Amino acid sequence: MCSKLNLLGMIAAVVFSVGIRSYSQERAQPQANDGSSSKQTRDFDLQPGVDPDNHLLVPFLEHLAEDQKHFWTFPARAKKKDLKWILPVAGATAGLIAPDSWISKQVPNSPSQLDFNHKISDISLYSILGAGGGAWVLGKLTNNEHLRETGFLAAEAGINATAVTYALKLSTQRERPFQSTGVGSFFNGGLSFPSEHSALSWSIAGILAHEYPGPFTKVLAYGLATTVMMTRVTSHQHFTSDVLIGGGLGWYFAHEVYRARHDPELGGEGWADYFEPNDEPPQRMPENMSSPYVPMDSYIYPLFDRLAAIGVVQTAYAGLRPWTRMECARLLDEANGLIQSEAGAPQGAARIYESLAHEFQPELARLNGAANLGASLDSLYARATQISGQPLTDGYHFAQTLVNDFGRPYGQGFNGVSGFTAHAVAGPLSFALQGEYQHAPAIPQYSPPLQQAIAAADATAPFPAGRSAVDRFDILTGTVALQYRNFQISAGKQSEWWSVTGSDPLLLSNNAEPFFAVKLDNVSPYRFPLLSKFLGDARSEYFFGRLDGHQFEFDVDHLLGPGQIQPQPFIHGLKISFKPTPNLEFGAGFTAMFGGPGQPVTFHNFFRTFYAHTSDPATNPGKRIANFDFSYRVPGLRKWLTIYRDSLAVDEYTPLFSSRPSLNMGLYVPRLPKLHNVDFRAEIIGTPHTKEFPPGFVYWDFRRYRDGYTNDRNLLASWMGRAGRGGQGWFTYWFSPRSTLQFGYRYQKVDRDFLEGGLLNDFSVRPSFMLSHELSLSGMLQVEHWNFPLLSNSGQTNTTAQLQLTYFPHFNVRK
């Protein structure tokens, strides 16, 4: 079966990819000027963009015949150099077919759901067909040649796409998802591969979007075409590869027909030929260069915070991190311009710039035209942590000794981590990987009385918790990304930091293990339609991911668990931030959980996460959290003081008008008066306690997900927990941009009504020094005193000593 899939993928890819290349090259040949007949003029030996003869009957039929001839006769003209297009697309096609059956089984198959999606598919297709046909009719009635041509070319592209898809259907005979065993067997009498609905919708959408290239037309045309593709899968009419390849065929015919037949004097926009040979040096565009995200524990973020606080970096969005390496290079380019233009540049700014410029030297070169092609082994590191005394390891119920550490396991005794980071870039593609070996001692199980107390607070069954010793290799993060015009799509294991705060985001942080997600990210500032006129440039992110480690869920009328529930809940989130002035940034976002047992992942349940709010577990989609944050550099003290606030509300659209918001208020002083090498940051944090909800309701979901807002049993956001108040402060002395000494204090008090409350105080010292250009030594000494009555009859003290050696080999291969 696998061999058939791969063979068929190769065949389809050959027909699809190299047909495009040949077709495009032949159409690009100069037009003959030797008195040739009109029939010869209508052939493809003409310049792109010249209208040959867009009329019905004989010219139209000749166009169709020529289109089909040039598509199907490519094998007779194929050359060895075409393998560079054939092989990648053939492999990609085979890769699309392989997971078809698994993806199809994830789609809900209730009759009402299938019927609803089938109707949406038909309505979307009829709408786009009506737009194409209506353009031709209206153009004829009003003598509007632009409209008439739009309908004419839409018909030509649509007929060509339909003809090819039906020819492939008859030759491949693939069964549909609802036929036989549902695995999509080929050569078995089916008509699934490829999807004619997708091909037809994308062929017309491409014509409409280029004849009338406004943003509204493009969003509407491509939105309808995408809806057709998605609903053909969710109605069990096609597999994923069927609709993607069908859509690709439709896009291809739209591209080729438009280039050869469109009259540029009528309007519209040009459509480049991506396969046409070009001997001119490429014009490299940084906005099309993908790059990986810089991890949140990198040394670069405190340096950028200092540059932003003293006004040298003015377009950094602190509320949406991590940033890509190319975005960091853009910010450095901005900083360099301000440093060079201002004679009185703040002291130390140039040294910080030089340190960061050394880190992002390849990306700075790419801003100036260098190729985005290379691979790098960024770091090798080893960290040893010794914890004497009983640490706190349950932030969901009590507190954590180690926070914002990507959910790495730890326990009393020796803990070890050793790993590497690496990345690679290739034009619009980028790849990143961080893998490490982790060791942590076992955590003892809770006593029966403690299990009962936690079960009562969470409305679950008693659960022993605990954990055996950890000895494992873990892919901490790993992503692949594609970028176009500063819009990047990334997929893989990743984490977010959605807050302007320094250590305690209320919505998303790196406190938990990164989870698998697809992220859509405007990696650089952009103009948001209408709003940017008043609110300034924006940055936005959206992600859709899946959590892990949840043991309990309330399914309509009964509790599931303990034990890993299946399927695990999904989570998605959106945040947008604006900068009206260089001194002010504000943003709003939300995350919502849904899916899991009793709540299938459907479009209906997905959309309900935006508006549904009910106490009925049968209809409530899950936990929804909203945040609002801002950061402001005080004008009179703009090089000395930045104030900020993060706020959060549960099951509300915004915390701005909430009567029960969680708050984190802070200030940052990048240079103390008379002590310019010292900065100071302080934050006051609190989660609410109201009579309206049970104690500890923040980050807990009594309607459905009883493990709350966690991934792998660690809080996705604030370490302050579900019913805590407190604060944190740091003094940092900067010997150099890469060598610092930090003194910190943390305080947390948990409300007595929640698990009898508790108290935590810790003091820490964190040195970090560059021993050479390639070797860093960092450490931490933390003394923590805590008193949680349910965990111990008396106060406890633990001491954490940590030492990390990091080697930056700067081993890279790049063009």
Image (spheres, rainbow, N blue to C red):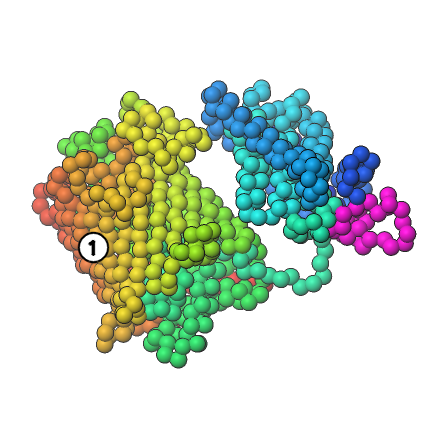
Quick check: is 167 in the magenta stretch?
Answer: no
Which sits in the foreground, 48 or 324? 48
Residue 167, percent across and down? 72, 30
Which residue is painted at 65% across and 49% down in the image? 268
Compared to residue 193, the image places residue 360 above or below, namely: below
Which residue is painted at 65% across and 46% down in the image? 211
Compared to residue 127, the image places residue 804 above or below, namely: below
Which sits in the foreground, 587 or 699? 587
**Left or right of 668 in this view: 370:** right
Which sits in the foreground, 50 or 804? 50
Magenta segment boundaries in residue numbering: 26-52
Residue 398, percent across and down? 19, 43
Dominant secondary structure, magenta: loop
Residue 578, percent across and down? 39, 55
Name the residue carrying label 1: 684
Compared to residue 351, the image places residue 712 above or below, namely: above
**Left or right of 279 in this view: 527:** left
User: Which quadrant would residue 622 be assigned to in this image?
Assistant: top left
What element does badge 1 sit on? strand
User: Which quadrant would residue 713 be assigned to in this image?
Assistant: top left
User: Which quadrant would residue 179 be assigned to in this image?
Assistant: top right
Which residue is painted at 58% across and 37% down in the image? 225
Task: Give the amino acid at mark 1.
Answer: Ile
